[in-house]
Image (cartoon, rainbow, N blue to C red):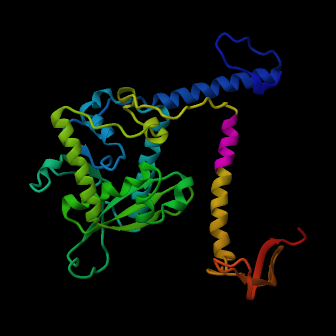
Amino acid sequence: MNHLDIDIQPEAEKPTIPEDLLYYELSALAAEISAKLDAERPPKAPYNHSHNNWASEIHHPCLKHLVHCRVDWPDRKPMDIEGRWRTDEGKRIEWEVTKWLGDIRYKIDDSQKRYTTDDIPEYADLKISGRIDGMIPIKRKLPEPFSDMKEIKVEIKTVNPNYWNSTKTVADIRRHPKFWINKIPSQLNTYLAISDDPGGLLIIVTFGKRPRIIPMLFDQDLWDHDQARVRKVNAHVAAGTYPEPIPFDATICGMCDFAHICNPIQTTKMCQVDPMDIFTLEMYLEMKEAADRFKEIHKELIGDKKKPGKYRGLDAIIEDIEISTRRHFRKVYDIPKEEKEKFLTGEDEVIVTTISRMGQ
C-alpha cells in the first residue's frame, strides 16, 4: 500500500504495515491540529452596515453590492476559514509594520481612529465612515502652504506576491485589474477628503520584500467619482430599491458575499476542474509570473534599438556567465503604397546580444 493513497475516514480500515500505520496516525494528528487552529478563528457575526457606507468599500465595481451591504447586511455570507486566516495575517503584518516604524522613531498614532462624514455639513449626506490605520510624524520641513503639517495619514495594505510588480505606484494600483487592489486608493483618499488633508502615504507589504512606501496626493477627480457612486447607493437605500446588477464577472460575482441574494445571471458556462490539476495550474501561474519578471529584466539588461539595455551591443564574461553580441547588416527596402516594385533604401545594422552560461 502506498501511504499517499490512504484516505483518512472514520469508517476506513486502518493499515497494518508499520510505516503506513505511522503515516495514518500522523495524518490524523495533522488534521486534529488544523481543526483546533481553525477553531481559534470562528466566524464573526456581520457588522451592522445600515447607517454608513464603508470607506474601504466605496470603490467596489458593483453598485448593487454596495446597496446589499447597507440593506442586507444581516444576510451577508460569513467569511470562510481561508478568509479568516488572511484577515489574521493582515492584522499581524500591520502590527509588524507599526513596530518597524516605531523602531525608527516614526511611531504610528491614532491607530483605528474613526472618521465619518456625518459631522461635516458639506458631506453629511454621504454617510461614509471608516477607520484609519494611523498617523505618522513628519520629520522634515514641508514647503508652503503645508509647513504647518506635523503628521500624515497612513494606510497599510498587504498584497499577494504575484501582484507585487504591478503595484509600484498609486497609478499602478488605481488601474490594477483586480478590484480589491484598485479600490485601495479610494479609502485613503476618502480620509484625506474628510479631514481636508493634501496627501498621505500608502504602505504596501508582501512576503519577503521590503515594504513599499508610496506617497499619495489627494485626488479630487477620484473623490468626485466615489461621491457620485455613494449618492446613488444612498438614493437606492432610501427608496428601497436596487440598481441593475453588473454583467456577470466570475471574479467579482464569484467573490461576492451577497451572491446568494443577488443571484447574478451567469452568461458563461463554468466547468468542473480536476482537483489534480491544481498543481499544474499553480505551476502555470508561477511560470507566467516568472515570464513577466524575465521580460522586465531583459529590458533592463538587453533592451532593444529604441531603448538599449545596460549590456546591449557588449561582450563580457563573469564567472560562468557570458554576454555576447553578434552584428550583421540587413538591406532595408521601401515599397510605396501604390507600387508593386520595392526600392532599396539602405542597410540597417542588426545587433543581437545574448546572455547564457558558458558551454551551453
Please say whether residue 280 is one of the residues in the magenta stretch: yes
Drawn side of residue 26 relative to residue 125, left or right: right
What segment carries the magenta color? 277-285
Q: Is residue 114 visible?
A: no
**Rendered-image quadrant of the N terminus:** top right
Asked if 180 appears above or below 354 in the picture, the reply is above
Position of residue 195 measured from the top left corner of the image (x, y, whole percent): 19, 61
**Rendered-image quadrant of the C terminus:** bottom right
- At a point 34% along the width and 63% down the height, the residue shown is 107
Prevalent SS, magenta region: helix
Q: Point out the residue furthest to the bottom here.
A: 346
Q: Point out the residue furthest to the right here.
A: 359
Drawn side of residue 26 relative to residue 127, left or right: right
Q: Nearer the viewer, residue 41 or 360?
A: 360
> Which quadrant would residue 207 be assigned to in this image?
bottom right
- At a point 70% along the width and 32% down the height, the residue shown is 276
Position of residue 92 measured from the top left corner of the image (x, y, whole percent): 44, 48
Position of residue 90 measured from the top left corner of the image (x, y, whole percent): 44, 47
Please say whether residue 78 is one of the residues in the magenta stretch: no
Position of residue 309 measured from the top left corner of the image (x, y, whole percent): 66, 79
Q: Can residue 358 be seen in this view?
A: yes
Asked if 76 appears above or below 60 in the picture, the reply is above
- At a point 47% along the width and 45% down the height, the residue shown is 89
Q: Which of 315 and 41 is in front in this view?
A: 315
- At a point 42% along the width and 65% down the height, the residue shown is 171
Q: Point out the residue furthest to the left here.
A: 121
> Which quadrant would residue 335 be assigned to in this image?
bottom right
Asked if 213 appears above or below 133 in the picture, the reply is below
Q: How many marks?
A: 0
